[in-house]
Amino acid sequence: MSEYKITDGALEFLKRVCEAVGPSGFEDEVLRMFHDYGRPFADEVVRDNLGSLIFVKRGSRERPRVLVAGHVDEVGFVVTSITKEGYVTFAPVGGWFDQVLLSQRVVIRTRKGPVVGVIASKPPHLLTPEERQRVVTIDKMFIDVGATSEEEAKALGIRVGDPVAPYSPFTVSATGKTIMSKALDDRLGAFIAVEAMRYIRESGIEHPNTLYAAATVQEEVGLRGATTVGWAVDHDLAIVTEVDIAGDVPGIDPRDAQAKLGKGPTIVTYDASMIPNQRLKELVIEVAEEAKIPYQLTVVAKGGTDAGRLHLYKTGRPSIVIGVPTRHIHSHVSIAHLDDIANAVKLVVELVKRLDEATVGALSSF
Ligand SMILES: [Zn+2]
């Protein structure tokens, strides 16, 4: 059995899903791509009524049911109005830092097709000295699609409620080791879940459980997809694959973000939405060491993930977050390391191999 590697085909798939438009609630295009990529490796594909896609891969036992989940929605915007002059106003979907928005290109997905625009505000020449000192807030910005009237903008198909996403090509950086893209949060996580399933299938790896690899929806607006996925899967244990905030960025104190790019996937020991099952945390560390997979321990004091909901399913379920250190999340260009992505897939695979009924039962026994 050869070691897991991100193949050219897998990287091409990751590029396509990252470039697709899919803010929370508008994930259909992305989910279609995941469906077509993952379908050949699953025994069954299920969708819940909120839209999340779940690949089922049966092992030697029906239980435990091991859910590996990453969300496919991205932070974006929705159209709120079209002005007389043909400009498009918008509201954020998910958390944005206003300062990263000006002069960035975006795509509005209309019923007639995609429309590219640029986020703009009053030009510097017309600002008063006081205005120049102030940060322009999102409510003062608009999208310019190049139209000169309301009628012209409307003729492009733009309507109130249309989704808007960053326009940002996926790039392998000059080092050849890292990737730059929008929406790594968290198409990367869903990619890792599906790649783990693909590798298990193609390598004929035995696992004493049923694997559910899920691409969840609407995480960025409050972990909504994770709530319904729990009911669709009825999982016994959850592994959430997510981006983690990289701390190797100027101005970040190591106490606020511990992870560095290229030093391995992270095991999140604490975040604002979940304190993981401690025995499961120790097991993940043990498995990583045994399989010689590098890892980093992190605390995300101010962020949450789908695991925040999945660990509270029914009477509670052991859950853990495995992260990929990522720079500049919630912007047009995030950066992650290919080795960390591959090692995250390996760690998930090693866990799935070991999670039998006795092991999972022991995580919650007194
Ligand atoms: Zn995320």
Image (cartoon, rainbow, N blue to C red):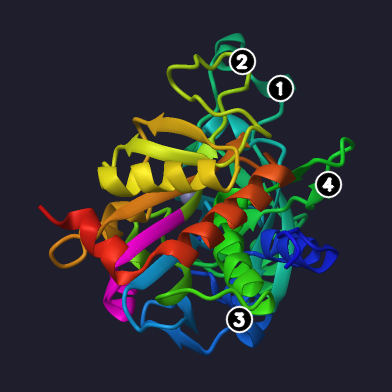
Q: Quadrant of residue 126?
A: top right
Pointer 4 or 1: first along the chain: 1
Q: Residue 216: where, in percent of width, then height?
A: 45, 67
Disc 4 marks a residue whose amino acid type is Val
Three-letter amino acid code at the position of disc 2: Arg
Pointer 2 local density, CA inside 10 Å: few below 14, some 14–19, many at least 20: few
Q: Which of the marked residues, 3 or 1, is nearer the chain's N terminus?
A: 3
Is the residue under label 1 in contact with that under label 2 (CB below 8 Å)? yes
Does the residue tagged 2 have its C-beta within 8 Å of any atom of ligand 1? no
Magenta span includes 39 = no
Q: Which residue is mark 2?
A: 132
Residue depicted at x 73% and y 46%: 338
Tell me if residue 123 comes above or below residue 312 in the rendering. above
As drawn, the label of residue 116 is: none
Q: Which residue is mark 1?
A: 124
Q: Which SS class for mark 4?
A: strand
Q: Quadrant of the N terminus?
A: bottom right
User: Which one is closest to the eye, mark 2 or mark 3?
Assistant: 3
Q: Secondary structure at mark 3?
A: helix
Residues at circles 2 and 4 in contact by the CB criterion of under 8 Å: no
Tell me if 116 is positioned left or right of 240 in this view: right
Residue 168, x across and y down, in percent: 75, 50
Q: CA distance from mark 3 to mark 4?
A: 24 Å
Residue 229 within the magenta-colored segment of the rendering = yes
State the mark number for residue 35: 3
Q: Does residue 285 lie above or below 353 as drawn? A: above
Q: Are marks 2 and 3 in contact (CB under 8 Å)?
A: no
Q: Nearer the viewer, residue 227 or 268?
A: 268
